[in-house]
Amino acid sequence: PPNPGHDSLVDGNVLAAKSFARCGVKHMFGVVGIPVTSFANRAVSFGVRFFAFHNEQSAGYAASAYGYLTGRPGLLLTVSGPGCVHGLAGLSNAMANTWPMVMISGSCDQSDAGRGDFQELDQLEAVKPFSKFSVRAKDIKDIPNCVVQVLDWAVSGRPGGCYLDLPTDVLHQTLTESEAEELLASAIDGADRKLIGTEVAKSEIERAAELLKKAERPLIVFGKGAAYARAETELKKLVERTGIPFLPTPMGKGLLPDTHELAASAARSLAIGKCDVALVVGARLNWLLHFGEPPKWSKDVKFILVDVSKDEIELRKPHVGVVGDAKRALELLNVQIKDDPFCFARNHPWVEGISKKAKDNVSRMESQLAKDVVPFNFLTPMRIIRDAISGMGSPAPIVVSEGANTMDVGRSVLVQSEPRTRLDAGTWGTMGVGLGYCIAAAVAEPDRLVVAVEGDSGFGFSAMEVETLVRYQLPVVVIVFNNGGVYGGDRRSPDEIKGPFKDDPAPTSFVPGAAYHLLIEAFGGKGYLVGTPDELRSALTESFSARKPAVINVTIDPFAGAESGRMQHKN
Ligand code: ADP
């Protein structure tokens, strides 16, 4: 409590920490050092839990995924110069995925800038291409306002990355406790809260409903924007009342269960190739959806796009564009069709066709999956993991997935039954997100187990963070598909590499048989090395029930899988 006559002084570290805590921030990820160590310690004292990483890149990925999972900005704290540069990986990933995140970096003394100060960098300039808003606190008095602004900007409109610059001299300035309180109160009161809810235009909802009603072969596509909007209840209602088949994008998976009878995932080519009207909710018509163009889509398809970003609608020029929050838009659409749900019966030829195709494809895949292939291909261990995850029931684990073949195979084999339970390389195809995402998921959703299904290459980007898992005792099981390289073991063609270094290990290869399971044991975690179905099943049973940090090193045939996964044409 304030002590009249004894108004103690607080410095920038205290004021910044207090500002974040006062704005409701609960967690922060990062790497401390000059000049932000005291800020991190102060934040902890104000009730913000700090997760200390080995590298800002992983911590940044964690902050981005935390933003997606919680709907509140994920925070990344870095030191100046190189720390800020490492953090750009996370910030740019947040922008690419449209996830709310704030990077806070200490920076050099303002008076020494331009003279080669310790870890000097023009950080405001460096973050520009990777953030939607950035600001420097030039004086201690600016801090509360800057904090409120970055937190608001990150979640307003289309979510994304924001940046707060805290120079060393500002962190060391002081003012009195009562001044600090006044500044904080007025910053919080005066916040210009432009929350997501730009009101959805009724006229566009009417046009969307009209178009859907007239459709002969409609399809509902939804992505991680709909997941972020927590639109699952409204989506379920829409799908089930209209009987329209649906297709989730990779991270949209789980908004409706993959096993739903209207799921078109296993008949994807047919669904997108033949639909005449596609309602696309919170998913961009980018490379992941083949730009909405032929030959994958029919040239006559009419799109109804629902997106919080007006720019996105303007870019894609759909037949009908609904700007606004996905949850709200679907709620209104459900009201609009209330008395006239234009039901597609299960025996409608379009629905029946998709359902038949999906069943055929699933049974073909199942017969491949049913075989126990040893040495392991990708399918056999993926089936065993799928069954172990499905056996856990609710709350379902969060699956983190990256790699080329591992992620591709995992996307079709692993079953998602609950919203926001899949995190993968995302819009940017970012490799190296795995351990950061695991830590974010464990922090954001403490009731869920986290299971990472990673290629050995993807795992290697951030493998040291297994120590972070052990330190905080997070319930994360990391399964490494170890086939000895990027895409697999040494498979270069004899003619491709010439010259004096032709006998070096191939650029795609790693040390064969790497003992990744020993890495976590170095820190007191649990490691498993498995190469047969029984060994894998037993490691999964034990580690899933222990809910403690573990690495399962799965030996995969180095020649299983394809180069570049399913994107050979781009390599
Ligand atoms: P996916 O990778 O699943 O296809 P994308 O990342 O391409 O999804 O697209 C997500 C889209 O969702 C972005 O264009 C973003 O603007 C949008 N979005 C984000 N939040 C919301 C929201 N609350 N309501 C509607 N759209 C949203």
Image (spheres, rainbow, N blue to C red):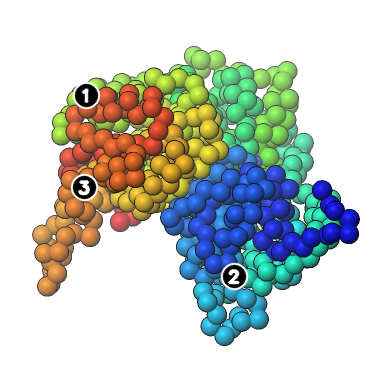
Q: Residue at x 28, y 28 (%)?
A: 539
- Nearest to N terminus: mark 1 or mark 3: 3
> Reading the chain from its start, which is encountered first: label 2 or label 1?
2
Q: Residue 286: where, in percent of width, then height? A: 50, 49
Q: Is residue 186 above or below residue 211?
A: below
For label 2, the residue is 107
Q: Amino acid at mark 2?
A: Ser
Residue at 55% in and 80% down: 117
Distance (Cα) linking label 3 and label 2: 39 Å
The one of 319 and 313 positioned closer to us in this rendering:
313
> Mark 3: few, some, or many residues within 10 Å (few <14, many ≥20)?
some
**Quadrant where the C terminus lies?**
bottom left
Q: Which mark is residue 171?
A: none
Q: Nearer the viewer, residue 220 or 325?
A: 325
Q: Compared with residue 358, is residue 158 higher up or lower down, i.e. above or below?
A: below
x and y percent of residue 205 in the render? 72, 35
Horizontal side, residue 493 vs residue 332: left or right: left
Question: Which mark sits nearer the N-terminus, 3 or 2?
Answer: 2
152 to the left or right of 431 = right
Mark 3 — residue?
514
Relative side of 387 to 124, left or right: left
Q: Quadrant of ligand 1?
A: top right
Looking at the image, which residue is at 64% across and 27% down? 234
How many residues crowd around disc 2 within 10 Å: few (fewer than 14), some, or many (20 or more)?
A: many
Say which quarter of the image contains residue 303.
top right
Residue 17 visible in the shown view = yes
What amino acid is labelled 3 in the image? Ala
Work out whether residue 333 or residue 484 is closer to the camera in this orientation and state it: 484
